[in-house]
Structure formats: structure tokens, C-alpha cells
Image (spheres, rainbow, N blue to C red):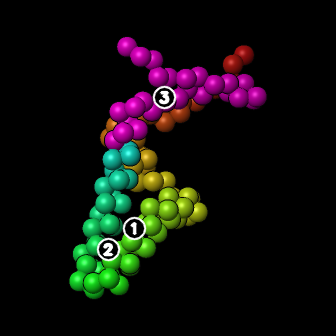
Amino acid sequence: MLDTSRSYETPESIRLEMRIAGPVVRACTWAIDMAIRAGLYLVISLVFAFFGGFGMAVILIGLFLVEWFYPVFLSCNQVPHPGRRRWASWWFMMTEPRYHGPRH
């Protein structure tokens, strides 16, 4: 079995153990983010599909804005991506760092 846990020691002699997300967990979180973006794409496309050439221009600009500014909006507001939130971590069996106290 592949060991994905890593142990780090801080300058204050505190040992932290963390599990690193593997490829399956990363793929699942990417899929959640992609599903949200696909939903936004669908809404934009359905709203502006009936406006002809102008609607197509708005759809393309909307797709560009969603693709580029969805992660920027989340990062600027200090919000984790929905696929990386704590509930997703629990769902995909990721763990929080564990504190083991100072080593003597």
C-alpha cells in the first residue's frame, strides 16, 4: 500500500502529520469544480442562445470570464474551491493535520 502520510517538524519542535491527497482525491475535487463550471456554462448558454450573433458573443465572453475568474474570485475572497472544502475532505477520506506536541 502506498503511504501518503508525511510528517513535518516545525522550528518550535512541533511534529505535524498530514496525509497528502492522491490522484483519486484530486480527480474527484477537480470533477466537483468542473461540474460547477459546467453548470454555469449551461446557464449562460441557455439564457443567451436565442439572441443570434450577439448571444453567441455574450456566451463566448461569459465562458471566458467563468474559466478565468471563477478561481480568482474564490482565491480573492479566501474561499476554498468547493471540491477542496472540509466536507469534500471528509467525503474523500482526507484528514486534517494532527498535532503531536513538542518532542523532548
Instruction: Give how far across and how far down residue 16 sits, in percent.
Output: 60, 28
Q: Earlier in the sequence, mark 2 or mark 1?
A: 2
Residue extending furthest toward the front? 53
Q: Earlier in the sequence, mark 3 or mark 2?
A: 3
- Of badges 3 and 2, nearer the viewer stands 2
Give the vertical position of 99 relative to 80 (above or below).
above
Which region shows up in magenta? 1-28
From the image, tell me which residue sits under label 2: 44
Instruction: Give how far across and how far down residue 20 sits, in percent.
Output: 49, 30
Question: Are discs 3 and 2 less than 8 Å apart at CB?
Answer: no
Residue at 35% x, 33% y: name it. Answer: 24
From the image, tell me which residue sits under label 1: 63
Residue 89, picture quadrant: top left
Give the vertical position of 101 relative to 79 (above or below).
above
Q: What is the crowding at mark 1: few (fewer than 14 residues within 10 Å), some, or many (at least 20)?
A: some
* Three-letter amino acid code of the residue under disc 3: Arg
Q: Earlier in the sequence, mark 1 or mark 3?
A: 3
Residue at 76% x, 28% y: name it. Answer: 11
Q: Is residue 90 visible?
A: no
Q: Secondary structure at mark 3?
A: strand
Q: What is the crowding at mark 2: few (fewer than 14 residues within 10 Å), some, or many (at least 20)?
A: some
Disc 3 versus disc 2: distance between alpha carbons?
Answer: 38 Å
Residue extending furthest toward the right? 11
From the image, tell me which residue sits under label 3: 19
24 drawn magenta: yes
Question: Are discs 2 and 1 less than 8 Å apart at CB?
Answer: yes
Residue at 29% x, 80% y: name it. Answer: 48
